[in-house]
Image (cartoon, helix red, strand yellow):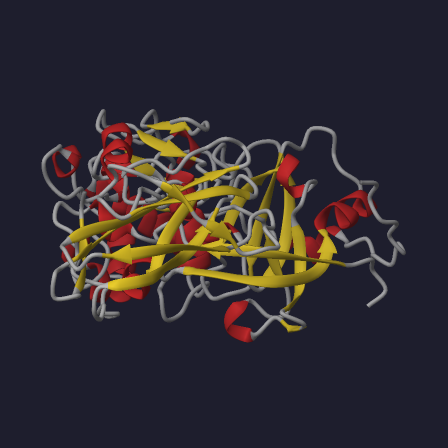
Amino acid sequence: MRYPMESRVAFIECAGNSALLYQKEPAPFGVQPLHGLLSCAEWTGVRLAVLLEEAGIDPSAQWILAEGADASGMSRSVPLAKAMGDALIAIYQNGEPVRPSNGYPIRLLLPGYEGNMNVKWLRRIKLTEGPTMTKDETSKYTMLLNDGKSLQFCFTQEAKSVITRPSPGLTMGAPGLYEITGLAWSGYGRIAKVEVSADGGASWAQAALQEPVLPMAVTRFRAPWRWDGGPTILQSRTTDDSGYMQPSRSKLIADRGARANFHFNGIISWGVAESGEVRHVYA
Amino acid sequence: MALAESPNLGKVASPDEIASWDISIGPDGAGLPPGSGTPRQGEQVYLAKCAACHGEKGSGKPNDRLVGGKELLAPGQAPVKTIGNFWPYATTVFDYVRRAMPLNDSKSLRDDEVYAVVGYILWLNGVIGENDTMDAKALPAVRMPNRDGFVRFSPGQ
């Protein structure tokens, strides 16, 4: 490969991840079924900007259309600024060629952006004046609000965190010292802090972040917790380095309505029973 | 950080090379091919190629419902978004059907068939008349009921 490359760690999260939490009642599942549409890897490839500069950029272009070679020709419009920014034409994932299921031979990597926009099996980039208004940025991936309008081009997967242990299925043992641990990530940049609550949000303590804390990458947090054996609710809340703080579920739904369907990044709550059983709750 | 230097190994593609790949349709109709179709012709395409998944007259089942009015989006119930009550541009329907449908044989429809079946779906949704021919001129002129239903996101919303 003669073209200059770079490597960076980035998460890819589906904009529909955690969509079950828009439901009225907490869905009785654990971390993977509820929040598992998320991955993080080291991506290596050529900056799209290098290729666009070489090709020459029409001065009237403000957007690009990225199109895949899959049977559906899945395509999304991306602002030129992002295309000329950190957008990567990814050729390798974790040091090996991108696998067929992940978009071989090349995929578009847009750090921090909706998973769908990281077009797999990339076959074509077209510069356009305005967005193409494809199926996936109109009929899908738009958020239906209470007033009947839909938010469109919600590119960034906003800051979010989830406690992975304890969590449903990982039943607690006897009361005593436990380590609460989980993952946090933000499409706006680096995780700046994660706070953990063991009393349903009444009080918060800062968790330790696993270094290195990288931008638009999954960050593990850990916090010691002395469980007294009584019923309680565990929560985590993250703030990124843009200052954005993960909202409570009730605030998110108050702002966007319960039918937004995408971009659920509200605070996630696990209810711990005296028996040590952990289940999904709203708090 | 300065952009790394390219070895400039790219080859300029000829218009012919680009043409067969350039299948995207802009919201103003840019890229729409020659050809045309009527809702009546589209009904034949639909019965042969679409009904098995999208149901009789676009009613859905087992797959996405294509036809339905604004009442399906009324508050207090799970929204059912259809082409008629939600899609902002008719050109998107053409773009998507041509590149992605039918699911098991995408890109198999001729351009005339795409115009026709798009016209059929638009007619079922009450957006165009039964005798309205769809082509490169007529399609972008169709104003979908939910054209003004979208707001661009900005952080903080």
Q: Is any part of residue B151 visible from this angle?
A: yes
* A265 lies left or right of A283: right
Give above or below for A22 relative to A101.
above
* A16 lies left or right of B127: right
Q: Residue furthest left?
A: B76
Residue A38, by quadrant, is bottom left
* B72 lies left or right of B102: left
Picture coordinates of residue A54 (x, y %)? 83, 47
Residue in front for this viewpoint, A146 or A148: A146
Give above or below for B109 relative to B149.
below
Residue A263, by quadrant, is top left
Which residue is rendered at x = 47% and y = 35% of the image? B27
Which residue is rendered at x = 44% and y = 48% of the image? A207
Question: What is the number of callouts on the image?
Answer: 0
Quadrant where the N terminus of chain A sits is bottom right
Picture coordinates of residue A217 (x, y %)? 55, 53
Which residue is rendered at x = 45% and y = 48% of the image? B95
Picture coordinates of residue B5 (x, y %)? 88, 49
* A139 lies left or right of B44: right
Picture coordinates of residue B135 (x, y %)? 43, 41
Quadrant where the C terminus of chain A sits is top left
Q: Is any part of residue B21 visible from this angle?
A: no
Residue A90, by quadrant, is bottom right
